[in-house]
Image (cartoon, rainbow, N blue to C red):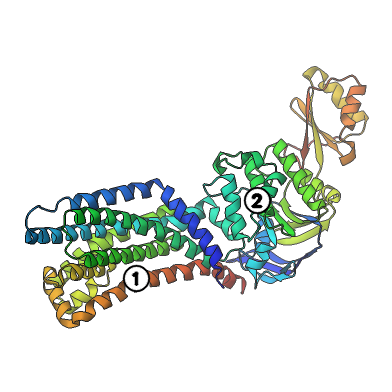
Amino acid sequence: MIDLANVRTITRKELRDALRNRWFVVFTIAFAGLALALSALIQPGGASLRALSYSRTAASLINLVLLFVPLIGLTLGAANLTGDRETGALAYLLAQPVSRAEVLIGKYLGLAGALLATLALGFGAAGVALALQGSIQDAGSYLFTVALAFLLALAMLSLGFLMSTIAQKTTTGLGGALFLWLFLVFIGDLGIMGTALFTQMPIQTVFFIAVLNPLQMFKIASILTIQANLDVLGPAGLYAADQYGSLLLPLLLLGLALWIMIPLAGAAAIFSRQQKLVLRGTAR
Amino acid sequence: MIIAKNLTKRYGKTTALNNVSFTIEAGEAVALWGANGAGKTTTLRCLLGVQGFEGELMVNGIDVKRQGKAARAAIGYVPQETVFYDMTVLETLHFYARLKKADPQRVAAVLEQVQLADQRGKRVNMLSGGMKQRLALAVALLADPPVLVLDEPTANLDVRAQRDFIHTVQTLNQSGKTIVFSSHRLDEVIALGSRVLVLSDGELVLECRPHQLAGELGLHRWLRIWVETEHRENMLKVLDEQGFTYQPNGRSVYVRVSRGEKIAPLRSLELASIPVEDFDLIDGELVIAEEHHD
């Protein structure tokens, strides 16, 4: 039975710790600064020129999210439990009347709150700047893109927590998180492209492999939201639009939700099994 | 208050505890004595329900194996070295008070109890080792638990902080708290304990009163005495004549003393007009080369 009061107490502490974290503050400033800078690139002129310019800015914001959000989500998550385990603070916390599930959920929610606040600040600043220029054509699609970025952030945090439960040391956790970031952002894409070219892979296979990557899910969903078609993604995008039609966006949202839940469930299972493994050992 | 039956704990192929059984009555102060790796900390971790084990363990009527969280609510825990989060003393106490479902008004009371009231606004990482241990004791007392579990609580403290801490725990024991603590310091066990459970290689090998421990284990108290070189021969002669067991070591000599007669060698030297430069009291077995003089 999970005690929500304990979860809330740990969440508040984690949220406050994250907001005091120097690296987190640097990330927040950098993200908000870059988002504002991108919004300033909107070209003055007539409505059609501003609309074209907005699309480019929105696409740049998506690329900014694809680069920054996985990095901060993965590293924040990966360093959390390992850091507390190394200092001994986790052992002391677990010696109190709390359950492991309460600790994990509380920590996750605290970091998630801090991460989403950072994204809200960056997107909010850029949104205000764009609105002042009269460049936002559809506030709804902008807000939906922000919501997609939130889902991606939560998915990356879940993956970070999974690494944090597996790794024993902070350095190992952070190393794993950075490798995963590189893989998701760069190596994964390049690998799929290279393999597809080399093996003459069918287009549907390329699409399926690509959308296994949560970053691709976010990218495709965001482009769909802004442009309503996937021409920009080439044959794979056209295949997806043709094959799934209006179901594509809900499917991508479901995929992102699964990327949040499955790694977090894995982290919870491993974190509680770290005790159960001991129990299993004693049962011999 | 605490009943352990056939407590067994294995880490892979290593057996950390092997069929350990004991009962601790309410209000007792029981020391777990043993060398590093004897199973003291493992026993305490079992009491807290933070690791699995075989056997049965009841704390305050709660089955630790099935209700670890409830058992931890009945225990105040002080580790050897407490690592707190980066908060002030007051924030730390409020944080743990919420987790322990303690009345927030208890915070001020425990701060007074451990004499940290004037440090309430200070960041925890600015506190001395002794103050951190007192803060850990304050956290342990927040929910006014019937049992206190202390894992070598004075191991990292200086002499004065050790004395203050032991005095505070003695007072808590006198007020009715059941104390379980691990230690490998004879003076601490004698000052604090009412009973000693001796662990060796994960097995309970002896149960005795604290004042019997030294004799049962062949441990001794030694008075180390320094005199000027010119008085050394005379000193050894006096110690021989008075029938003391001693071991010379450079400019000093270790003299075996019993608990109530620690002053006896110094008195003998004073009567013989041998000036003593300095002295120290040491518990346990000497690691210097054996050189018995009975």
**Residue A100 seen in render:** no
Mark 2 chain: B
Q: Which class describes the residues within 10 Å of circle 1: few (<14), some (14-19), or many (20+)?
A: many
Element at badge 1?
helix
Same chain assignment for discs 2 and 1: no
Say what amino acid the circle numbered 2 marks: Val
Question: In x, y percent, where is residue A36?
Answer: 23, 50
Residue A170 rendering spot, x and y as whole percentages: 43, 53
Kind of residue at disc 1? Trp
Residue B32 versus residue A259: which sits nearer the camera?
A259
Question: Image quarter for residue B145?
Answer: bottom right
Quick one: label 2, few (<14), some, or many (20+) residues within 10 Å?
many
Q: Nearer the viewer, residue B221 or B163?
A: B163
Q: CA distance from mark 2 to mark 1?
A: 42 Å
Q: Which quadrant of the structure image shows residue A116?
A: bottom left
Mark closer to the observer (2, 1) = 2
Q: Is residue A53 visible?
A: yes
* Image point (67%, 40%), residue name: B157
Please indicate whether residue B186 sits to the left or right of residue B242 in the image. left
Q: Secondary structure at mark 2?
A: helix
Question: Quarter of the image containing the C terminus of chain A?
Answer: bottom right
In the picture of the structure, the residue carrying the numbered disc 1 is A259
Instruction: Please indicate whether residue A117 sits to the left or right of residue A206 in the image.
Output: right
Based on the displayed image, in which of its 4 quarters is residue B117 positioned? top right
Contact check, label 2 and label 1, Cβ < 8 Å: no
Q: Position of residue B91 (x, y in %)?
A: 56, 49
Judging by the rendered image, the residue that carries numbered circle 2 is B107
